[in-house]
Image (spheres, rainbow, N blue to C red):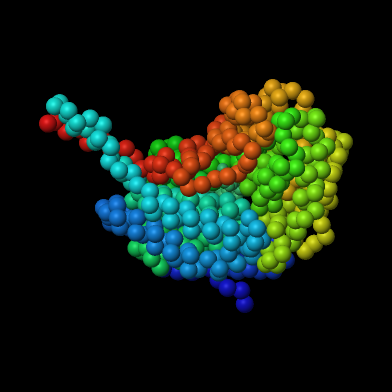
Amino acid sequence: MSRRYDLIIDGKSVPADDYAEIRSPSTGEVVGLAAQASRAQLDDAVGAAQQAFAGWRCASDETRSEACAAVAGAITEHQAELAELLSREQGKPLKGLGAEFELQGCIGWAGFTAQQSLPVKVIEDSEERRVEEHRVPIGVVGSITPWNWPLMIAVWHILPAIRTGNAVVIKPSPFTPLGTLRLVEIMNEVLPPGLVNAIAGGDELGAELSRHPDIRKLVFTGSIPTGSKVMASAASDLKRVTLELGGNDPAIVLPDADPAAIAEGLYWGAMINSGQTCGAIKRLYVHDALYDAVAESLLAIDAKVPMGDGLDTNNLLGPLQNERQYRKVIELVEDAKARGARILCGGEPTDGPGYFYPVTFVADIEDGAPLVDDEQFGPVLPIIRYTEVDDAVRRANGTSYGLDASVWGRDPEQLADVAARLEAGTVFINKHADIAPHIPFGGVKCSGLGVEFGEEGLAAYTDIKIINAAV
Ligand code: NAD
């Protein structure tokens, strides 16, 4: 009998009328049963959060900081259990940049958030007036998360919200609800009841949450089309929004780069989580002079990277997380083949069970092909040839995406010049996908609105309140 994972409302496990079977993307076996929240249970969760908020908004800064540190401690205690559940449900391997790495991220981000603060700023202290800028909590935060890094993104949403005095209702992706339900249950061992609530369900539950009149801020991580719907829902009562959306990150390899030296960074910059990462390299622009050498260095690394069931500790890459994504990746590669692109490795889905698609490098492909223009979100990388650096920059920028970008080479001046011209929230030089809790992260253009992490990310969970006193 599969284990049931209940909703977490007001500090308690709450059963539902319906449960959804959540299956392993590697084996097809049932990992667990996820409670499906009703509309009334959504209201219960928001109501519990509102009640908890009434007390928590008055809690001292020290109390809130200690609570975040206690969450980091509770996750640490349960990290082996959570990593295994994450690997079984999401598919990512335990090892490498997989489930254990994601749990380390959860602990690191929670611990860092505990130490952050937003002290009162004195804007003016004169004979005329004393003006202070305070950061005050917003209210109940609705968090909606995707299936690729479900636990880390849950921590990214929840911890800054409670650190700054808000309460939370989180709704994980219907593909990966189990880890989040368990994570929030664990958080509730150390938090006041109702401060963090978890409800699981389908996309419609996300839409209802984003429309809920008692939610005051929405933090959403997911695709651009859904992000735009969430923003529309927020408009009617001016909810605050933070949107972290899709990316189609370009990497430009300059003519003076050393192919062997950059290959490892390029490979994992693209293949992290089997490419199912918003900020992974998704288009690789390589100068004609290095084109074959870069491709060969990537193939040499790939030959040493095993893919398979995540619980086998030899594996470093896992499957696509769900059938929809698996079909999309197959379709994009088939389209590239039909256009005459050259498949350097992979290129055919593996026999089941599981949604395994091999690492695939695709050469002789141009902008305009869907594999280049769309977010493939899989272990498939188009390698695009260029001859003029200006042209590569123009093509890299020729998209509505703007999450990250990277430039690889040796001449510091040229690296800095290209970095300055790339349109992205983050531009990396000689690396990719290097994020940290003290560095603001977010997308420009259609890749998002606002940032997470750093002081700016924390401040996004607050309103500014000015106290302007006569003296
Ligand atoms: P998705 O947009 O399909 O779903 C994300 C979440 O939104 C899920 O919980 C889903 O149930 C919910 N949802 C669906 N319809 C909704 C609606 N109408 N209103 C409110 N919520 C709704 O995205 P996905 O397929 O789960 O995730 C993959 C996408 O997420 C990719 O585009 C990826 O780049 C992006 N992503 C971005 C970041 C970032 O930080 N920028 C991080 C991770 C993933």
Q: Position of residue 318 (x, y in %)?
A: 70, 58
Residue 21 placement, left or right of 164: right
Residue 340, quarter of the rendered image: top right
Look at the image and tell me in which quarter the C terminus lies: top left
Q: How many marks?
A: 0
Up-down relation of residue 439 to residue 72 (above or below): above
Q: Position of residue 202 (x, y in %)?
A: 57, 55
Residue 49 placement, left or right of 436: left
Residue drawn at the location 44% of the way across and 60% of the way down: 72
Residue drawn at the location 72% of the way across and 30% of the way down: 256
Residue 137 placement, left or right of 285: left
Look at the image and tell me in which quarter the N terminus lies: bottom right
Asked whether residue 194 appears in the rendered view, the answer is no
Q: Nearer the viewer, residue 281 or 208?
A: 281
Q: Nearer the viewer, residue 361 or 410?
A: 410
Residue 284, quarter of the rendered image: top right
The residue furthest bottom is: 1
Q: Position of residue 362 (x, y in %)?
A: 80, 41
Residue drawn at the location 51% of the way across and 41% of the way down: 441
Residue drawn at the location 52% of the way across and 39% of the way down: 442
Q: Nearer the viewer, residue 187 or 79?
A: 79
Asked whether residue 349 appears in the rendered view, the answer is yes
Q: Position of residue 250 (x, y in %)?
A: 67, 35
The residue furthest left is: 471
